[in-house]
Image (cartoon, grey):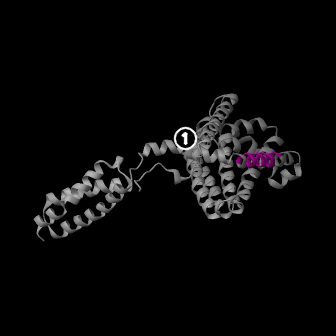
């Protein structure tokens, strides 16, 4: 190949593409189309030069031009820190806020069932006998329940709690693919465990210890589980009642949005795990430990309400369709 003739024939196209790339912020629709066409042509020229010429200067020039043109054509990606800020100020809180009635009803049902079950267990010795022997109940009430929070080093215990709760929340969200039908069953197991344990503690007048240990971390932890369950069941209901839009369109949008819940709850449950590992078994007075749990819960609810309501007013859905990545279009 005559490299000089090749350069002479195609230099105008290279110079024009370089000019368009440098002025891409002010291009007209026709110029955008021209830039895309020139990018494809110059990419072909680069391929030809690499295979037919050993001129490193020309290869380097075309490589740089094609790289800059590719960036202009495919769009400028928002910095990662901005995406992270957007996720925690828009995507996660708006999905949580839009599903607020779902997880509120879920929480009321959970607490109501656990409370009724606990009262039933506490007031019926025959039920207690069917659960465990008197010696085993005594061991649970006097030692095992409290020792559970301090028998392992705080750091490893926090990691274990975090992984366990994150897995439960992710499993609950994943069940939304099955119309959310398995979610009540998953919550039933947790509610039954809370109710039975509370009932056994109440039967031995240890209810103050029960709430003193479970409240600091339990408020935030259970709220996270309720949110995951509510968002998952809301997604399942979307399949049944998509409204005026196409079912698959709404399902895809809500499915992507619900993933924000799963990711956001990783952080929420991390905080809950830290409280369970470092605050619940600490030597702080009960009122102080419970107070820390109440403050953490209040901060989370305020965060969802303030940021979620604001994002909802701006017609945000939490879907990635509104991700701030842009590309020039005619």
Residue 64 placed where, x, y %? Answer: 24, 55
The answer to whether one can see residue 64 in this image is no
Count of all numbered marks drawn on residues in the image: 1
Image quarter for residue 12? bottom left
At mark 1, the secondary structure is: helix
Q: Main secondary structure of the magenta part?
A: helix
Q: Does the magenta segment cover residue 109?
A: yes
Q: Nearer the viewer, residue 71 or 115?
A: 71
Give the residue displayed 47% in from the left and 46% down from the top.
Answer: 83
Please report the residue visible at 74 percent of the width from the left and 37 percent of the height from the top: 211
Can you say which quadrant of the picture contains the N terminus?
bottom left
Q: Position of residue 285 (x, y in %)?
A: 67, 28
Q: Nearer the viewer, residue 103 or 246?
A: 246
Please say whether residue 45 is visible from this viewpoint: yes
Residue 279 picture quarter: top right
Residue found at x 29% / y 51%: 21
Residue 293 x %, y %: 66, 35
Is-magenta flag for residue 207?
no
Give the labeled residue for mark 1: 89
**Is 261 in front, or is 148?**
261
Please provide the residue range marked out in magenta.
Answer: 103-115
Q: Is residue 124 left or right of residue 235?
A: right
- Residue at 54% in and 42% down: 88
């Amino acid at each position: 190949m005559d490299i000089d003739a090749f350069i002479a024939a195609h230099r105008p196209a290279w110079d024009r593409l370089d000019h368009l790339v440098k002025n891409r912020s002010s291009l007209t629709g026709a110029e955008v189309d021209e830039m895309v066409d020139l990018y494809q042509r110059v990419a072909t020229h680069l391929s030809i030069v690499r295979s037919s010429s050993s001129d490193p200067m020309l290869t380097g020039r075309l490589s740089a031009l094609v790289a800059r043109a590719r960036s202009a054509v495919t769009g400028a990606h928002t910095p990662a820190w901005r995406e992270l800020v957007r996720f925690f100020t828009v995507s996660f809180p708006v999905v949580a806020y839009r599903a607020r009635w779902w997880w509120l009803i879920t929480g009321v049902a959970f607490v109501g069932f656990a409370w009724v079950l606990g009262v039933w267990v506490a007031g019926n010795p025959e039920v207690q006998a069917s659960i465990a022997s008197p010696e085993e109940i005594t061991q649970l009430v006097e030692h095992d329940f409290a020792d559970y929070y301090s028998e392992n080093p705080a750091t490893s215990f926090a990691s274990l709690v975090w992984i366990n709760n994150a897995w439960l929340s992710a499993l609950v969200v994943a069940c939304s693919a099955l119309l959310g039908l398995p979610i009540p069953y998953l919550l039933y197991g947790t509610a039954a465990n809370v109710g039975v344990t509370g009932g056994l503690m109440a039967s031995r007048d240890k209810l103050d210890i029960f709430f003193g240990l479970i409240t600091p971390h339990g408020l935030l932890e259970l709220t996270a589980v309720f949110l995951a369950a509510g968002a998952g069941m809301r997604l399942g209901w979307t399949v049944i009642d998509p409204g005026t839009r196409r079912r698959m369109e709404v399902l895809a949008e809500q499915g992507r949005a619900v993933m924000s819940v799963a990711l956001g709850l990783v952080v929420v449950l991390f905080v809950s795990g830290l409280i369970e590992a470092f605050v619940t078994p600490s030597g702080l007075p009960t009122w102080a430990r419970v107070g820390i749990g109440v403050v953490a819960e209040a901060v989370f609810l305020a965060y969802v309400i303030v940021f979620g309501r604001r994002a909802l007013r701006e017609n945000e859905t939490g879907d990635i369709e509104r991700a701030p990545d842009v590309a020039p279009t005619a």
